[in-house]
Image: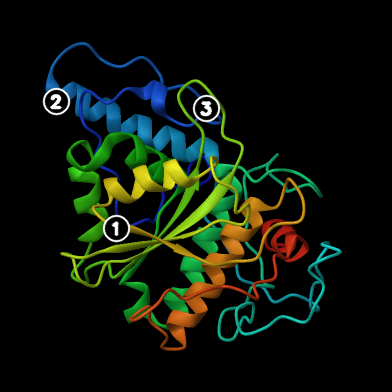
Amino acid sequence: MMQAGHRSTSPWSPQMPLNFDWSMWPTSEPAPSPGPSTSEEDTLTWLAKELERREMVTGTRPQSMMPSPGPSTSEEDTLTASPSSDARVGGLDRTASSRVAAGSVLGATEWLSDAHIQSDYDFLEQQLQGIDPALAARIRLVSPSVSHLLRHLGPQGAEGTLQSIYHQSDAPADFLFLPVNNGTATRPGTHWSLLFVDGRNPQSRVAYHYDSLQQAGYNDEPARQLAEGLTATLAPARMPRQSNDHDCGVFVVDGTWALVQRLLDGERPDHEPLHLDNLVADRQALQNRLTRL
């Protein structure tokens, strides 16, 4: 994402169908400006400007990666054990900093917004590019808004968007990370979970679903819809259960960092999911990444 006056450096942009219903866009973001009623060329021009406008108001790309003065600690009373291999940072520095738009600083019990997740994903992508450019080229950290779009469009409606994700460069997308939200066009979302897609074999993609709530009826159906839109088979994967009602988004971003680290370490979900049984959700570390300059 980007600040006003700065273009995004993201190498791809979602391809939106001309008849897309903007009411399906996440309700936490501003409504689109009125669309044109003239030619198809005018419509495409308007869509491009509209996507750029949305980027300008929902977040910013990180501008620096400065080290933390010291290790952070978790605020969770039940998650204070020493980090295991699932939570280690290794070559990825989770204690450095990213930036979010003004007003998006994360509170002690605040639910994560699209902007929080997008900013942390942008920062993770930047770190990964510096550590292993070849692997970075084969990983896609999909924005919450695009994830929401794919969930509602389905495989046929999302064909252009899928092509831009899977084939954005010379390196095909082997692994995708997508935040899943249970929001609808008429009801704001109340829960985040994570899809980790193994797309190394395009004919048999698998979407592993990590859900810290572990309760039927919340994100099972949204995850199924999104996996279907990605032409992937949905499969469960384990992560710890959250101990409160506000850290589901923290589990999503920290789960993404942990899985990317394991990919850097050479692990692959060849025979079973990369379970995150010992993941530590560290809200304080995320707050530090989002606020330090």
> Closer to the camera: disc 1 or disc 3?
1
The relative height of residue 286 versus residue 111 in the rendered view (above or below) is below
Work out which residue is located at the far right of the displayed protein and give it: 77
Q: Which residue is disc 1 drawn over?
A: 233
* Residue at horizontal 21 percent and vertical 11 percent from the top: 37
> Closer to the camera: disc 3 or disc 2?
3
Q: Quadrant of residue 123?
A: bottom right
Type of amino acid under label 2: Glu
Neighbourhood count class around disc 1 (C-alpha, 10 Å): few under 14, some 14–19, many 20 upward = some
Type of amino acid under label 3: Thr
- Of the numbered discs 1 and 3, the one sitting upstream in the chain is 3
Q: Position of residue 151 (x, y in %)?
A: 36, 40
Q: Position of residue 195 (x, y in %)?
A: 43, 57
| 145 sits left or right of 15 in the view | right
Q: Which residue is disc 2 drawn over?
A: 41
* Residue at horizontal 25 percent and vertical 35 percent from the top: 16
Q: Position of residue 173 (x, y in %)?
A: 27, 66
Does residue 1 show up?
Answer: no
Image quarter where the C terminus lies is: bottom right
Work out which residue is located at the far top of the displayed protein and give it: 37
The relative height of residue 92 versus residue 73 in the rendered view (above or below) is below
Callouts 1 and 3 close, C-beta under 8 Å: no
Q: CA distance from mark 3 to mark 2?
A: 28 Å
- Of the numbered discs 3 and 2, the one sitting upstream in the chain is 3
Q: Which residue is disc 3 drawn over?
A: 27
The relative height of residue 31 versus residue 255 in the rendered view (above or below) is above
